[in-house]
Amino acid sequence: MNDLSRRKLITTGLAATAGASALGVAARLAQKYGLVPPDHRGIYGLGETLTYASQRLLTRHSLAREFSRSHISKPPLANEIPPLNEAFNRLQAGGFADWRLSVNGLVDRPASFSLDQLKSYPSHSQITSLQCEEGWSYIAEWNGVTLSHVLEIVGVQPQARYVVYFSIDPDWWESIDMADALHPQTFIAYGMNGSELPVGNGGPLRVRLPRQLGYKSVKYITQLTVTDSLKGFGKGLGSASPEGGYAWYAGI
Amino acid sequence: MARLESVRVPLGACPSSTSSVPVTTVTSRHSALVRVTHWITTLCFLALLVSGVEIVISHPRFYWGETGNVLTTPLFKLPIPSSRALVPTGYGYVLPDQNGWSRYLHFQAAWVVVLTGLLYIISALFTGHLRKNLLPGKADLSLRAFSTAIANHLRFERPSEAEAWSYNVLQRLTYLFVIFVLFPLVIWTGLAMSPAFVSALPATVTVLGGQQSARTIHFFVSLSLLLFLLVHVVMVCLAGFRSRMRAMITGRAGTNMEHT
C-alpha cells in the first residue's frame, strides 16, 4: 500500500465517520422538531422524511391558494364512495339530526358536538382546489368551522402533537400534525357551494385540508382524537393510508 | 480515482518503441463522480418512468388550466385502460391500483436524482467538467462544423477516434439541453403539482397556467426525457456498446479494442 492510497483511505474513513455522525445528529434534531413522518420506516422512508421535513420547514404557515367564485368547477364532481354502512343510513334517514362529532384524547373538556352546534360557531369559507392523488382536481367553495376553533373549545393540552380523525366508515381514518390542525384553512366542513355538503362530497361533515391531497380530507367524520403519539392507532403508521400503501403526508 | 489512474497510465506516456505495452492506450474517460452520478441517475430515471406510468394509468386524461376531472373536457386522452373505474376509457376492464408504491417510489427517486444532480452540477462547475467537456468550443459553433456533425450523424458514421475521448458538438448541446432545460423543467412542473409547495410559492404554478397545466407539461417533458434516453442508448450501441459501457462503468476507454 503506497502513501497516496493510505492517505486516501484515512480521509475517506474520517469523512464517512463525520458523515454518519452528522446524519445521526440530523435524525435526532428532526425527531425533536417533529420533522419525521409516522411512516418513516421501510424502503421509502428516506423520501417521505425528506418531503415532510422540507415542507414542514417551508410551509408551516403558508396558505393554500384561494380562487374567485368564477373558478368554481361546474358541475361539482363527487368521487366514487364506498357503500355507506347501516349506521350512516340510519342517521341519514333522520336528516342527520343525531350526527355527532365527539372530541377526546389530550383535551381538557372532551365533548360531543351536533351539526347545529358546529354551525353556531363562526363560519368560514374558502374557495380552494381539491386535488386527488390520481391527478384530477376541482375547485369548490367550502363552508365550515375551523378545526382550530373546535380545538380551542375543548382545550388542547400542551403535549398534543397530532389530531386523529375518524370517518363513520371504520376503514377510513387519518391524522395530521398540529401545524396542519391549527392551520386557518383546516376546516370541519358542512357546506359546499352555498348549500349543505352533499353526501357524495362527504356530507354531512368532512375535513377540508387544502394543502394536502384529497384522501386526507376524510368524509363523514364522527370523531377527533388529540394525541401525543400515533403508535396506539391501527398499525402505528399514522393513518389508514400507509396501511393501504399510500403516504401519510400528502402535501407531496 | 481518475487522477490516480492517469498517473499510473498517462495517455500517450507509453513510448512507441517498447513493444511489450499493448497498442491500446488505456486511461480514464469519465471521472469517478461522473460515472457514479450517471448510474444513480439511470436507476432513478427508470424508477421514475415505471412509477410515472403507473400514476398516469390512474387518470390517463390531460387538461389545461387549473382544474380537470372526468366531468370536464380533456385536452387529450391516452388510449389506454385505467386503474380507476371512474375514468371512462372505452375498455371494459379496470387495471389493478398500483398508485401507493408508485407514488412512494416516484418521490423517493425524485429526491435521490435531484440530490445527485446537484452534486453533479456543483462538481461540474468546480472541476471544469462543464467548461471542458460540455460547453462547445467557438469553432464547434460554426455553421460548417454543425452541418458536418449533422451529416455524419445522418450517415450513421462511426464516431472518429477523437470522439471516444470527447463529445462532439451535437452531444454537447443535447447534454446541456437535458441538464439545464429538461431536468429543471421536470422538477419545477413536478413541484408545481404539490398543493403544499405551491402554498408557499404560488407563482411556481400560476405562471404555468395552473396545476393541470403543470401536470400536462410534466408529462411532455417526461416524454422528451424518454426520447433522449432512447436516442442516447441507440447512439451508444452505434458507437460501440462494449467500449462505451466499459468507459462509463470502469472509466477506461480503449480506443481500438472494439475493432480487434
Image (tube, rainbow, N blue to C red):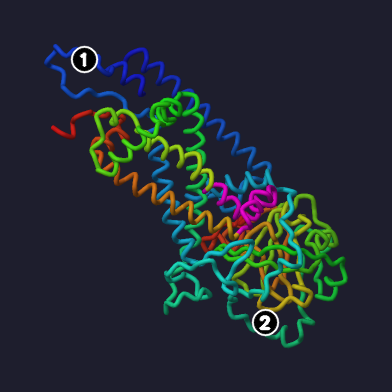
Q: Position of residue B64 (x, y in %)?
A: 58, 62
User: Mark 2, mark 1: which one is toward the viewer?
Assistant: 1
Amino acid type at mark 1: Cys
Amino acid type at mark 2: Ala
Q: Toward the viewer: B33 or A15?
A: B33
| Subunit ID for the residue under disc 1 | B
Look at 88% across and 71% down and name the residue there.
Answer: A120
Residue A232 location, quadrant = bottom right
Look at 14% across and 11% down and name the residue there.
Answer: B17
Identify the disc placed on residue B14.
1
C-alpha separation, residue under disc 2 versus residue under disc 1 = 86 Å
Q: Position of residue B196 (x, y in %)?
A: 66, 53
On the picture, is B125 further left or further right than B165?
right
Q: Where is residue A134 in the image (x, y as percent from the top left)?
A: 54, 64
Look at 27% across and 19% down and name the residue there.
Answer: B11
Mark 2 closeness class: few <14, some 14–19, many ≥20 residues within 10 Å: few
Residue B36 inside the magenta-drawn segment: no
Q: Position of residue A98 (x, y in %)?
A: 78, 81
In the image, residue A183 sits, relative to residue A169, either above or below, namely above
In the image, residue B141 sits, relative to residue B58, either above or below, namely above
Residue B209 inside the magenta-drawn segment: yes
Mark 1 closeness class: few <14, some 14–19, many ≥20 residues within 10 Å: some
Q: Toward the viewer: B244 or A47?
A: B244
| Subunit ID for the residue under disc 2 | A
Residue where numbered disc 2 is placed? A87
On the picture, is A87 further left or further right than B77?
right
On the picture, is B19 further left or further right than A122?
left
Q: Give the range drawn in magenta.
A: B186-211
Residue B173 location, quadrant = top left
The verdict on a common chain for dots 2 and 1 is: no
